[in-house]
Amino acid sequence: MLGYAGKFLEVDLSKSTFKNTTLPDEWLKDYMGGRALAAKILSERLIQKWEDVDPLGPENILFFMPGPFTGYFPGGRTCVTGKSPQSDGMVGSTVGGEFGVELRCAGYDGVIVSGKAEKPVYLFIKDSDVELRDASGIWGKDGKQTDTLLNRECRRLLAERYPHVGVWKEPAKLYIGPAGERKVRTSVVVAKWTHAAGYGGYGAVMGSKNLKAVAVKGTGPLPEVADLEKIKQMIDVVCKGSYGNVLWRRWGTGGGGYSFGAETSSEPVRNWQEEWHDQRSYGVDQFESKVWVKPAWSDFGCPTNCLKISCIRAGKYEGAITDNPDYELQAFLGPNLGLFTPEENVYLSSLIEDLGMCGIQAGSVMGFAAELFQRGILTKADLDGLELKWGDVDVFAALAKKIAYREGIGDLLAEGTYRAALKLGKIKGKNLLPYAITSKGISIGAHGIRSGRDFSREIGYACSVQGGDHSSMTDVPIDGWGSEIWQIFNDSAVMCIFTSFSISPNFRYEFYNAVTGLSLSRREWLNGGGMKTLQIQRALLLLGGPDLKWNPKVDDDNPERFYEPLPSGPCKGQAADKASVKQKVQLYYEQAGWDQNGIPTSETLSRLKLEYVNESLSRLRS
Amino acid sequence: MVENTVKNTNPIWISRELSRCSGCRKCEIACSLHHENKIWPETSRVRVFMLVPGTEFPHLCTQCEDYPCVEACPFKALAVNKETSAVSVNPEKCTGCGKCIEACPGKVPHIHPKSKKILICDLCGGDPHCAKVCQEGGWSCLKVVDRGDHEFKLYARTPEETTRNLAIKLYGEKAEELL
């Protein structure tokens, strides 16, 4: 099919074998790539025994999936997914960087990994030459060391094996840090030090498979498209739109650390006890003048360069390097922990990334622990002697290391906020879930709903098939602008939304049609591939297991904290309205074709030709 | 193929201010679209190296004053275009032997992955597409200037040497362990 390389690479780590798989064109037409196509493959292969599949066991399947947009639509991304060790469902998590472009130039539409390697390995792909290599030299190394060592080794191999062609450029790489190796549920899959497929916990899945990294160099062209002239014009439209957005290009999301606190009042402050702050020390001007050493940093084809590079060159935190940090890390490794300076935020972000953890999930679980300490529920003795006081960056750094290496209290917190709340609750004989700001086992992104000033909506997290993922929120009406269906498109064509604020809603369908030569409309996506993917992900989430089972009556809701009035700021007193949320949840069920209990109905699934999903869901209905 | 609409009358140089590179690789995209009518990064005559995150920079022919690559070609496949000062490749004569790569102080030329012929910047006949997209985006890492009489050979550095320079400039001492 046009826009596709034509094959997927399947790797069985248990047997150290490879094969090329071709998928039916019908699947590609319905599910595109990335998140949707992975949902289709994953459910076809595992839904019958889903509840028994341990996300951290060899039976889980791990996907590295670009999409038909990767490399063409400005700003390259790749989707990483599988059964999530956070939600026990499937979370389509995308990461920026060159990986998907290299993979498509190597002739693959995706990599599908199953089994578990006997010893740590990494996968090295050079066009059709594929190899599992000993990773004992990089196992245990932090993010930056891993990147360096992989680069050295892969470029040496390229030069030795393919000589006389000139100097080899670097391969693209996705890898894990020490946290992923230890199956920490808040760990991530990393690219270029600072980019991460964060939500879902797929760093732990890589770790559970003894897979340290995947490196790829492709020397072919991107797959052929139907109408290259049109694609070129459309790329130009996206870029020109982005160039006009001057301050967005200059600040990226780095302006958020201040503005989502001071203006929008939706930023987690001290584990969401507040969502407002007015700390001028945390202004974007401070980041810009104190820590940004590279003012414009882009991935493949990106016109926006919303990323910057920060480096601390002197003083206590000398040597810390990260990106802006982006808003999510500014929030969760800043105000959420009572920290309000760029230097502390850069230091902690750099550390969390080197450890291979998610800034959101790790920042959330540390904030959760700090609130329990504030309330006297966790003591210094419980915390291995750490006095977990708000604003003490050194103590949070010490805790982050304990989590990544699963030492002492870190072992429990490494399970992520929701599971830690359950486990600690048992130990303490208290319900600690009110302090866990999560949805479906996933800590909620840094966009609170109480002020109503942010893009997040009342049922955005409650009804999302990706739980707390702020980049996959939903809303009623299900065909409206806030619906998750559109996020599924973005994650399946695999495109960056930060390059494309200026484009019209239909633009991306035109782009898809120019790539594939098909004629897909927004409406057809809503009633076709988008809706099918939503149903599959919902089914997998509700089937759950083996350790957690979601009850829609209880769990299709906001964390309790969002019903407490905001204590400060311009929206003081505002809270989510329980009755309104409940009503919207029911409305969402109706519009999604789910029954009163939130389970997709047989009629819905039959209409969408998802009988195999219906068959497995009958286990929930009986 | 995109036709050049503008022809410079004076020889030009693609000025490169490496610290300004964002790593977007729009230059590679433009180059491969122009020369191959495909997005094909490995065939781009300008290649953005990113050996250490943050140190991205474009690596392309600087047209040395003494053209050691042209001198080194055993098959007389390379010549200097008098009009533009670019090195032109005669694909009939090029055997892909790589002697020009060895001769280049910056190891800039590389072999086309399919045709196996050498790839060297031809300045798009005087209207380089890489510089155009870089200017449009406001990065201004690549910029067309009148060539004049300068020591352009200085800019023929290996990717490793330039990476080290940029990494130390960005990250200070820490850079040594990142290389």
Image: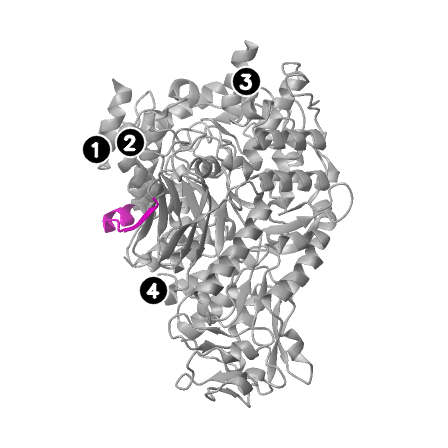
- The one of A163 and B60 positioned closer to us in this rendering: A163
The boundaries of the magenta stretch are A16-30
Q: Residue at x 67, y 76 (%)?
A: B154
Q: Earlier in the sequence, mark 2 or mark 4?
A: 2
Q: CA distance from mark 3 to mark 2?
A: 32 Å
Tell me the subunit letter for badge 4.
A
**Element at label 3:** helix
Residue that extends furthest to the right in the rendered view of this protein = A315
First of labels 1, 4 by sequence position = 4
Q: Are marks 3 and 4 in contact (CB under 8 Å)?
A: no
Q: Amino acid at mark 2?
A: Ile
Q: Looking at the image, which is closer to me, A276 or A406?
A: A406
Left or right: A406, with B95 as reference point: right
Kindly indicate whether the residue at mark 3 contacts the one at mark 1 (C-beta within 8 angstroms).
no
Q: Nearer the viewer, mark 3 or mark 4?
A: 3
Identify the residue position indicated by label 4 in the image.
A227
Numbered mark located on residue A47 in the image: 2
> Is residue A18 rendered magenta in the image?
yes
Instruction: Determine if marks 3 and 4 fall on one subunit.
Output: yes
Q: Residues within 10 Å of mark 4 (few under 14, many from 20)?
A: some
* Furthest residue in direction top, as rendered: A429
Q: Nearer the viewer, mark 1 or mark 4?
A: 1
Label 2: which secondary element: helix
Disc 2/disc 4 C-alpha distance (Å): 38 Å
Q: Say if mark 2 contacts mark 1, CB within 8 Å.
A: no
Q: Quadrant of the C terminus of chain A?
A: top left
Mark 1 lies on residue: A611
Q: CA distance from mark 3 to mark 4?
A: 53 Å
Q: Along the polypeptide, which appears first: circle 3 or circle 4?
A: 4
Label 1 is placed on what type of residue?
Glu
